Image (tube, rainbow, N blue to C red):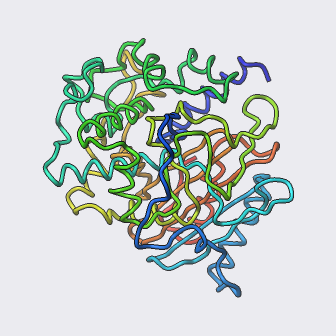
Amino acid sequence: MTRTRFHRRLRTRARACSALLCAALLAATVQTSAAAPAFAEGPGHHGGPDCVRTERPLDAQARKVLEITRKAKKDLKLNSVEVKVTLDGREVLTDALGESMTGVPAQPDMHFRAGSVAFAHIGTALLQLVEEGKVSLDDTVERWLPDLPKAEQITLRMLASNTTGLHDYVTDPAFLAELVPHPFRQWTPNELLAFPYSHSFWYEPGTSWSYSHANYLLLSQALEKITGTRIDEFLKERIWGPLGLRNTQNNFTPDIPSPVLHAFTSDRGIYEESTFWNPSWTTAPGAVITTDICDLARSAQAIGSGELLSPRSYRTFLNPGTVGLGGATATCPATICIKQTEAAHFGLGIIVVNTWLVQNPSFSGYAAIQAYLPSERLAIAVSTTKTANAPEGNTAEQVAELIAAELAPDTPLTIS
């Protein structure tokens, strides 16, 4: 595959992802001289040595979920599938199918990149600061981000809800021309922000909706200024620790804590290992996370239920004013300014689809999803890796959709 064809495929994928309100392709962090922090401590035991397959024999519900997962792995030609499902806090099934590498079976406690799941954590932590009276969502950001164009018009709410009008550097052809041939390159925030800053805004801040990775890069920087705390430490204190996410952490290098679920991709035209491609281009230093399937399911349940928020903040989390925004204009096409509806819209770091609350990172051979249905207290977490013959797109979504159809047939989880 030529570079031109690859660029076209990435742009097409990004447009499709936006149309489906995919919050992010991934999230990761820039390498710094700081040492990576230890696993988040917490009262719960949702990962690590306790993240193991459900004891056999399985009950009928667990057997059905496992049957669906096995069939999906075969049909989608996946290398591995990791899955955890809980219902009203009760484990339905935890399992891992396939291989991490040739001859190395996938295990539930293996770590993988969780990307944009961090954005739901950041949105939740921001709302906690609002509850404490430390900031308002409608504070403009010029005091914390003086170099941001239109900073005196852009608010914390706009950054967190993707309503600033900033271009997304991930779909910028100039950025792709640098990223594709250099997957191990170390990117700095200033290098990344130079791409959206080189374009005019799609619209006046706050008047429409369009996804941009730049928004959460900038929001992370603002939160560090507001709190005087590095973003990874901020999330550890506010989210990972309280929820007991012991195996969710930021990594300042492309390293992934052992044991590792390895990833492979055909994105560059050949099937190659991509596990340790440098994720520094994805978001702010300190805001990229790796996790395991048990922590991902716990995140789905806790973030999706608003466990760490007041009822009022939870309502804002689900709709910070995005419903009704978006739609094509003379300056912004419908593929960029996506219409936000009650049935499908972006919240404050979370995607709302048919009342399901979702985050769905997908990049460099990794794909995952955390999905929570409040009405049923149903949490689904899936992580997948691909063989050379697997289809494009987020295959974890497809597995989760099939599981949801079995467990919540009246409320389809329809993302793709």
Residue 146 vs residue 371, the one in the foreground: 146
Residue 184 vs residue 76, the one in the foreground: 184
- Residue 75's place in the image compared with 170, above or below, is below
Task: Say which quadrant the N terminus sits in.
Answer: top right
Quadrant hosting residue 212:
top left
- Residue 183's place in the image compared with 380, above or below, is above
Residue drawn at x 35%, y 38% is: 220
Residue drawn at x 34%, y 34% is: 221
Residue 285 vs residue 379, the one in the foreground: 285
Residue sitting at the far left:
133
Quadrant hosting residue 196:
top left
x, y percent for residue 194: 44, 16
x, y percent for residue 300: 46, 61
Residue drawn at x 43%, y 64% is: 41
Residue 264 vs residue 17, the one in the foreground: 264
x, y percent for residue 404: 56, 65
Locate residue 117 relative to residue 59 in the image: left or right. left
Residue drawn at x 82%, y 42% is: 388
Locate residue 352 relative to residue 22 in the image: left or right. left
- Residue 67's place in the image compared with 140, above or below, is below
Question: Number of callouts in the render?
Answer: 0
**Residue 21 seen by the camera:** no
**Residue 389 seen by the camera:** yes
Quadrant hosting residue 211:
top left
- Residue 231's place in the image compared with 183, above or below, is below
x, y percent for residue 42: 41, 68
